[in-house]
């Protein structure tokens, strides 16, 4: 693909249009060879579903919305291909494809941030064709919404995010008709440029012009202009970011220092009487832990008052004044002069999962409580899975028989929600088809919130903090719970979990080939390769626990590498046995587009933080799940940064264990991130697990 194959003038796939060229689709003849158990022509997919004790009046997500989502995923996949093949030598010397993509995603987040911060309340009243941002910015917004708890809370706490949420009706319009943004109108381009202070609408043009950003000095609050990428690895999008304020002379301004000021400023908002006055991660959804965070915040605020030694005195201000907040922010930073010290003080009254969640929201100076670069990178492997399955091809589901595959995925998603009502404290792992519908539901944020509250009596998160080894156990539990609830196998892709006993493997094979007594027909896929592969566990997520020191990082690396080697040997041994006993079955599964990698490889730590808080991403992916109990599994004070290499029968492998951090070194964690953890983005880790509420 050349540099201009995919841009904002390239139409998004229109699923209502005629089918794609034969070379790009799985032909009917190919599909039919898998169709010995296809449902009869008279089959009508269900239109109402039971979730717990309730029955829906209609499906929670429409087939057209799923198709529209697939059209967007194809646009994202083609955008990634374009960037990876683009010659960046005139901008930055980035020869590695992963490094190019990580850098580009960093730029996309900068573009999204400027657009979001400059949104005006009247923007929602304009037409979808005119108001929607470019495709790269849509990609960032899409990833943001797929972290529904953070997205919902930020919309309550931050004014700019509240305006962003008013545009959700336009995002719905794209799902209903992706062609609305296929060709940017003149009005759309002009509105974008006017609302972003002249940023080019075209993402390629922006790559050549967007090389700096402004931030506020945490000491004197003067505006500082910093480079996004530098040869010495100290650019804003790089792990080793550091700068100096030319106004007050403060040096060593890092992401950790910016995060320190962001947290201090939020603590300084008093009194605690609304969403804006609460710390990120502590407000939505409401829980009993909120009071603990409020107490911790009040304690830090009160203890910092004596550290304000200037004039005028604090008691001369109104309690909610902006001036008082500014003085108290400096007082808090003066008393607790590092992020580590401030975190320690908060822990006096607040600890555990709620504390971990709050702290993870403070990693830079942006208003968003989630690292959007990491969020986009984590979605990359899921996008690739859908693309490789062929499901994003234009016209792939244009026929009635083909569309039944989406009805099947829709039915399984409703069953997945029903399963969650049976065990509110368990973690359940979605398959690819279920995750597709789940993601689509999350792209309707207000509806998703209302639906989960109505049918599950709690908010269901889709978080990114489940470690790979725990994920494997969660998937096995999901299979058993599904079988017990619906009397049908959960996955039909033929993959086996490493370490199963012979009895467990036989049980799974019986579940694969045997016929349940009376299973729900809408939960059984037709015997077609892509449909069976879609019941494969979703693996676009991983968790990264950050080591505090280099020595701790090295110890963790050795421990995890040894365990990974052991697991890989077990996998190789199992693969040989499986190849002999299931040769014919494997041949069918290995047809183009349906190849699976190893399940749940052991995560390997990739970097330790610099300057108190690490900023980088791990390579590989581990898989996602939904947990009814809510909360955060990840702990920023943990012992290592781990990636879920390989993930659920597929996903990227570990890129290496070195931290890197020099200018866009790519691969192995250095520079722009590549497959590992550093620089301006990294190779994608973490993401997409669910915590079910509080």
Image (cartoon, helix red, strand yellow):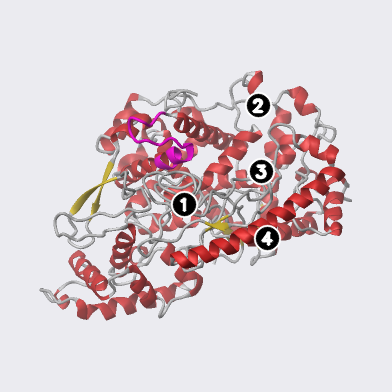
Classed neighbour count for the residue bearing mark 4: other residues with Cα under 10 Å, few (<14), some (14–19), many (≥20): many
Q: Which residue is mark 1?
A: 677
Tell me where the magenta segment starts and ends, as one range: 87-103
N-terminal of the pair, mark 4 or mark 1, is 4
Q: Check residue 102 for magenta coloring.
A: yes
Between disc 2 and disc 1, the foreground one is: 1
Q: Nearer the viewer, residue 75 or 324?
A: 75
Residue 348: x percent and y percent? 40, 80
Q: Check residue 405 for magenta coloring.
A: no
Q: Which residue is mark 3?
A: 433
Q: Is residue 514 visible?
A: yes
Between disc 3 and disc 2, the foreground one is: 3
Residue 511: x percent and y percent? 84, 50
Label 3 SS: helix
Q: Is residue 293 above or below residue 157?
A: below
Q: Which residue is mark 2?
A: 398
Residue 296 sits in which quadrant? Answer: bottom left
Judge from the rendering whether residue 42 lies leftward or rightward of residue 324; answer left or right. right
Measured Cα–Cα span from mark 2 to mark 4: 35 Å
Measured Cα–Cα span from mark 4 to mark 3: 18 Å
User: CB under 8 Å between callouts 2 and 1?
Assistant: no
Between disc 3 and disc 1, the foreground one is: 1
Between disc 4 and disc 1, the foreground one is: 1
Q: Nearer the viewer, residue 572 or 344?
A: 572
Residue at figure coordinates x 38%, y 59% from the top left: 363
Specify the label residue 474 is tagged with.
4
Q: Is residue 358 above or below residue 217?
A: below
Classed neighbour count for the residue bearing mark 3: other residues with Cα under 10 Å, few (<14), some (14–19), many (≥20): many
Measured Cα–Cα span from mark 4 to mark 1: 26 Å
Label 1 SS: loop
Residue at figure coordinates x 42%, y 37% from the top left: 136
Between disc 4 and disc 3, the foreground one is: 4
């Amino acid at each position: 693909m050349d540099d201009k194959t995919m841009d904002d003038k390239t139409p998004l796939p229109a699923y209502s249009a005629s089918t794609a060229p034969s070379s790009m689709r799985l032909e009917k003849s190919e599909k039919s060879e898998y169709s010995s158990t296809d449902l009869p022509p008279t089959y009508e997919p269900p239109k109402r579903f039971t979730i717990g004790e309730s029955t829906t009046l209609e499906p929670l997500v429409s087939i057209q919305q799923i198709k529209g989502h697939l059209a967007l995923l194809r646009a994202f996949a083609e955008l990634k291909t374009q960037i990876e093949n683009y010659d960046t030598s005139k901008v930055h010397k980035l020869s590695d494809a992963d490094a190019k993509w990580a850098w580009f995603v960093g730029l996309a987040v900068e573009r999204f941030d400027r657009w979001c911060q400059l949104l005006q309340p009247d923007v929602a009243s304009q037409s979808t064709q005119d108001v929607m941002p470019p495709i790269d910015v849509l990609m960032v917004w899409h990833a943001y919404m797929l972290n529904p708890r953070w997205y919902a809370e930020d919309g309550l706490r931050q004014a700019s995010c509240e305006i962003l949420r008013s545009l959700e009706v336009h995002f719905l319009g794209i799902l209903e008709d992706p062609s609305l943004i296929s060709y940017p109108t003149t009005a759309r381009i002009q509105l974008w440029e006017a609302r972003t202070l002249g940023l080019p609408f075209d993402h390629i043009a922006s790559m050549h012009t967007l090389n700096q950003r402004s931030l506020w000095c945490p000491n004197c609050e003067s505006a500082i202009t910093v480079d996004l990428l530098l040869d010495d690895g100290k650019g804003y999008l790089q792990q080793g970011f550091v700068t100096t304020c030319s106004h007050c002379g403060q040096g060593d301004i890092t992401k950790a220092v910016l995060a320190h000021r962001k947290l201090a400023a939020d603590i300084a908002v008093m009194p605690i009487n609304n969403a804006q006055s609460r710390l990120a991660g502590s407000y939505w959804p409401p829980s009993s832990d909120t009071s603990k965070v409020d107490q911790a915040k009040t304690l830090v605020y009160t203890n910092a008052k004596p550290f304000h030694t200037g004039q005028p005195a604090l008691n001369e201000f109104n309690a909610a004044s902006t001036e008082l907040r500014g003085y108290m922010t400096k007082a808090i930073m003066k008393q607790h002069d590092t992020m580590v010290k401030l975190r320690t003080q908060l822990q006096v009254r607040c600890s555990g999962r709620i504390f971990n969640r709050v702290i993870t929201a403070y990693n830079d100076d942006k208003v968003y409580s989630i690292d959007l670069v990491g969020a986009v990178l984590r979605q990359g492997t899921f996008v690739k899975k859908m693309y490789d399955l062929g499901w994003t091809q234009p016209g792939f589901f244009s026929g009635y028989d083909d569309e039944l595959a989406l009805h099947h995925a829709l039915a399984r998603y409703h069953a997945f929600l029903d399963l969650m009502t049976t065990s509110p404290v368990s973690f359940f792992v979605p398959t690819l088809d279920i995750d597709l519908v789940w993601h689509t539901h999350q792209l309707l944020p207000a509806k998703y919130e209302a639906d989960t509250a109505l049918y599950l009596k709690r908010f269901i998160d889709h978080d990114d903090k489940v470690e790979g080894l725990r994920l494997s156990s969660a998937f096995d539990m999901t299979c058993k719970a599904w079988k017990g609830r619906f009397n049908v196998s959960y996955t039909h892709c033929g993959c086996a979990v490493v370490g199963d006993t012979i009895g467990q493997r036989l049980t799974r094979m019986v579940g694969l080939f045997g016929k349940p007594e009376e299973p729900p027909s809408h939960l059984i896929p037709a015997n077609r390769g892509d449909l069976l592969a879609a019941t494969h566990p979703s693996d676009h997520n991983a968790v990264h626990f950050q080591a505090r020191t280099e020595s701790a990082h090295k110890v963790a690396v050795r421990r995890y590498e040894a365990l990974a080697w052991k697991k890989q040997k077990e996998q190789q041994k199992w693969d040989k046995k499986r190849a002999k006993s299931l040769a014919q079955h494997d041949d069918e599964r290995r047809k183009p587009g349906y190849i699976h990698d190893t399940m749940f490889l052991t995560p390997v730590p990739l970097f330790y933080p610099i300057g108190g808080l690490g900023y980088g991403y791990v390579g590989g992916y581990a898989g996602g799940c939904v947990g009814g109990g809510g909360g955060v599994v990840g702990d920023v004070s943990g012992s290592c940064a781990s990636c879920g290499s390989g993930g659920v029968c597929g996903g990227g492998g570990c890129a290496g264990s070195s931290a890197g951090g020099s200018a866009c070194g790519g691969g192995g964690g250095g520079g722009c991130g590549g497959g590992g953890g550093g620089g301006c983005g990294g190779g994608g880790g973490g993401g997409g697990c669910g915590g079910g509420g509080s």
